[in-house]
């Protein structure tokens, strides 16, 4: 695991984009694993700006997203489908038919998404990290062998996501469908971004703590090509 400490969130986004651009330029039909939440927005803004400058194209790229809430429609304002269109897809030349997000609430839905991903090889997987160390929606205690599955969200995760639902925890979905940890680990390269003091404990445990299912992100210590960009606040406990 390679950790690069940046001055602030703007530098994190720019440095992370350099890694993403290198993948896309060298492999125009790359398969991107994408994430939602506040962490990757800066990266996506850099992707959009460079596309609009005419420096990169996503017309032959395909994408697979990490996760989605269970129990809300795809067109809900806070669905991850809506998020991806608003924050990235609607602003670049990616073919909508080549974008994939998990959706549903049954094991069959999970198996179908896992099967779709087994037919490709993800070239670069974007990740954030939760305050409790989750990657995707793989909460503490999730098996490192897990594939795409339905998960009950822990209270800390629901609390963190309430800001997207007018601060009301009751409105936050209580379940999600997510790539499993084993699914994530199949990616050729992992690009994790984390900013803010609130992520400092999780970043430190991910990098320096024992590899344990109580800290899901700690498994990234075993990945052959994992690069992490953090700002000074998120790196403050390393």
Image (tube, rainbow, N blue to C red):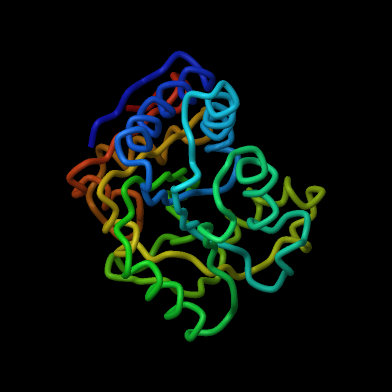
Residue 163 coordinates in the image, percent (x, y): 73, 45
Residue 95 relative to residue 206: left or right? right
**Residue sitting at 56 percent across and 48 percent down?**
36
* Residue farthest along the top direction in this orientation: 7
Residue 52 coordinates in the image, percent (x, y): 60, 26
**Residue sitting at 37 percent across and 48 percent down?**
29
Of residues 156 and 50, the one nearer the viewer is 50
In the depicted structure, whether residue 146 falls above or below residue 127? below
Of residues 110 and 166, the one nearer the viewer is 110
Q: Quadrant of the C terminus?
A: top left
Residue 224 coordinates in the image, percent (x, y): 17, 45
**Residue sitting at 44 percent across and 35 percent down?**
193
**Where on the picture, by quarter, is residue 44?**
top right
In the depicted structure, whether residue 209 falls above or below residue 187? above
**Residue sitting at 35 percent across and 55 percent down?**
216
Residue 132 relative to residue 94: left or right? left
Residue 192 relative to residue 65: left or right? left
Residue 21 relative to residue 197: left or right? left
Of residues 155 and 191, the one nearer the viewer is 191
Q: How many labels does the image show?
A: 0
**Where on the picture, by quarter, is residue 124?**
top left
Q: In which quarter of the image is the N terminus?
A: top left
**Where on the picture, by quarter, is residue 180?**
bottom left
In the depicted structure, whether residue 171 falls above or below residue 60? below
């Amino acid at each position: 695991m390679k950790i690069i400490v940046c001055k602030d969130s703007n530098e994190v986004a720019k440095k992370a984009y350099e890694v993403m651009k290198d993948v896309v330029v060298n492999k125009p039909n790359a398969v991107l694993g994408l994430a939602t939440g506040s962490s990757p927005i800066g990266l996506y803004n850099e992707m959009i700006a460079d596309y609009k400058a005419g420096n990169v194209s996503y017309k032959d790229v395909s994408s697979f997203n990490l996760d989605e809430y269970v129990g809300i429609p795809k067109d809900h304002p806070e669905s991850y489908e809506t998020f991806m269109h608003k924050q990235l897809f609607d602003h670049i030349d990616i073919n909508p038919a080549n974008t994939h997000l998990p959706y549903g609430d049954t094991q069959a839905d999970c198996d179908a998404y896992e099967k779709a991903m087994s037919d490709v090889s993800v070239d670069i997987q974007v990740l954030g990290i939760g305050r409790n160390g989750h990657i995707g929606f793989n909460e503490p205690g999730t098996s490192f062998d897990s594939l795409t599955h339905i998960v009950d969200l822990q209270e800390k995760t629901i609390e963190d996501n309430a800001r997207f639902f007018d601060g009301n925890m009751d409105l936050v979905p209580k379940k999600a469908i997510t790539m499993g940890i084993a699914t994530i680990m199949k990616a050729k390269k992992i690009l994790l971004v984390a900013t803010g003091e609130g992520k400092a404990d999780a970043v430190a445990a991910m990098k320096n703590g024992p590899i344990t299912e109580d800290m899901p992100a700690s498994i990234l210590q075993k990945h052959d090509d994992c690069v992490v960009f953090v700002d000074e606040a998120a790196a403050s406990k390393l």
